[in-house]
């Protein structure tokens, strides 16, 4: 006569072998070996058995548990293997993979890297300031009081609290001098903003490289030498450089610089690339007032400053016809500078 435990074992093994997928298999496990399972129930029943019966049933119970557990495991791994195989069956390993495309530096970044490398060789350090500025750093400290007509030319975007988006990187001149006494030799690349009509050569956001050199005995000759060297390194040794008198409130004298080179696409045309001049004593005095000392005594220190149009330089260097291309993120444009 077969014991009911043996019958249970055989029934469980039959159901396991018939289970079509993992969920059905788990249901079998619960039914026989779960806490309420029919094989598990015999564990409870043991207590009520006689001394003679107990070892016999205990042995059968152990055998049933071991056999069913092993069968569950074996069938489980078979089912999983079959599932993986069917998932891979649809996979065409001969299809080409997804290529990992290599990015490139934006032309403005490339331009900036070149400029920084050239100024580094002349001992210029990097400085920076915030895009969102106050009127004092953007205008007043740069000898441009509220009623000054230059403010209208440099109209910008104002925040409700009166702060503004800087119209030039010249703000960094002031911030650098507030932070440290002379001598100073820095460049400050960054974004500038203006309420310009947007066209091929004007953008509401563009970029400049500001420069400031303050020391004893700095003259216009130093300014000319530095910027001529920079422009010839950038555009090639045959580049012609022209200094034109101009007006900026924060420099005296003030100059604008044009370049021309046969090797450039612009050919015979002079192109304006830079505003510059000798730092106005009123700028030093505004800084002294803010610092509360006389670190920048205009009787002792002189300096030159310049603002290079970075987008303009990049347009000349890479022969780019429209400033708007820099911000459009069109890969067909950007990939040409790989
Ligand atoms: N900030 C001027 C502008 O945006 C450019 C400039 C002119 C900067 C003369 C200077 C400078 O540092 O000395 O038009």
Image (spheres, helix red, strand yellow):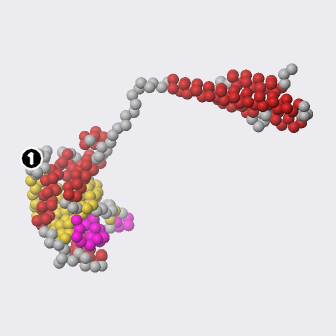
Residue at the top extreme, as displayed: 1
In the rendered image, the vertical position of residue 336 relative to residue 75, given as above or below: below
- Residue 20 horizontal side relative to residue 127, left or right: right
Q: Can residue 249 be seen in this view?
A: no
- Residue 219 horizontal side relative to residue 333, left or right: left
Q: Considering the image in quadrants, where does the C terminus appear?
A: top left
Q: Where is residue 100 in the image (x, y as percent from the top left)?
A: 37, 37
- Residue 30 horizontal side relative to residue 95, left or right: right
Tell me where residue 62 sits by quadrant. Answer: top right
Q: Position of residue 14 (x, y in %)?
A: 73, 22
Residue at the image position 13 percent from the left and 69 percent from the top:
219
Residue to which mark 1 is pinned: 262
**Which is nearer the eye, 248 or 156?**
248
Q: Can residue 313 be seen in this view?
A: yes
**Which is nearer the eye, 1 or 209?**
1
Residue at the image position 54 percent from the left and 25 percent from the top:
85
Region in magenta: 160-185
| Residue 162 belongs to the span the image colors magenta | yes
Q: Considering the image in quadrants, where does the N terminus appear?
A: top right
Residue at the image position 32 percent from the left and 61 percent from the top:
131
| Residue 223 belongs to the span the image colors magenta | no
Total tally of numbered discs in the picture: 1
């Amino acid at each position: 006569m077969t014991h009911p435990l043996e019958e249970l074992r055989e029934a469980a093994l039959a159901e396991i072998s018939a289970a079509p997928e993992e969920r059905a298999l788990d249901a079998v496990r619960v039914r026989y070996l779960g806490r309420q399972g029919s094989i598990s129930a015999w564990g409870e029943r043991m207590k009520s058995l006689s001394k003679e019966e107990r070892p016999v049933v205990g042995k059968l119970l152990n055998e049933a548990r071991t056999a069913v557990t092993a069968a569950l495991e074996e069938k489980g791994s078979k089912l999983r293997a079959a599932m993986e195989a069917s998932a891979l069956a649809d996979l065409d390993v001969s299809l080409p993979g997804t290529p990992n495309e290599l990015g490139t530096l934006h032309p403005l970044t490339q331009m900036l890297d070149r400029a920084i490398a050239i100024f580094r060789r002349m001992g210029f350090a990097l400085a920076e300031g915030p895009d969102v500025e106050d009127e004092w750093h953007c205008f007043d400290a740069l000898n441009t009081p509220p009623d000054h007509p230059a403010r209208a030319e440099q109209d910008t975007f104002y925040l409700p609290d009166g702060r503004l988006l800087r119209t030039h990187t010249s703000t960094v001149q002031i911030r650098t001098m507030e932070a440290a006494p002379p001598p100073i030799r820095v460049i400050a690349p960054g974004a500038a903003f203006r309420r310009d009509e947007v066209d091929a050569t004007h953008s509401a956001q563009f970029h400049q490289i500001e420069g400031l050199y303050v020391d004893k005995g700095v003259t216009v000759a130093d300014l000319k030498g530095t910027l001529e060297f920079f422009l010839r390194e950038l555009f090639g040794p045959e580049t012609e450089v022209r200094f034109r008198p101009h007006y900026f409130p924060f420099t005296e004298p003030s100059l604008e610089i044009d370049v021309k080179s046969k090797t450039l696409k612009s050919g015979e045309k002079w192109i304006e690339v830079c505003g510059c001049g000798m730092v106005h004593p009123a700028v030093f005095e505004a800084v002294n007032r803010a610092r509360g000392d006389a670190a920048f005594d205009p009787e002792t220190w002189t300096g030159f400053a310049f603002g290079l149009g970075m987008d303009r330089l990049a347009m000349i260097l890479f022969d780019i016809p429209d400033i708007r291309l820099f911000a459009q993120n069109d890969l067909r444009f950007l990939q040409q500078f790989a």
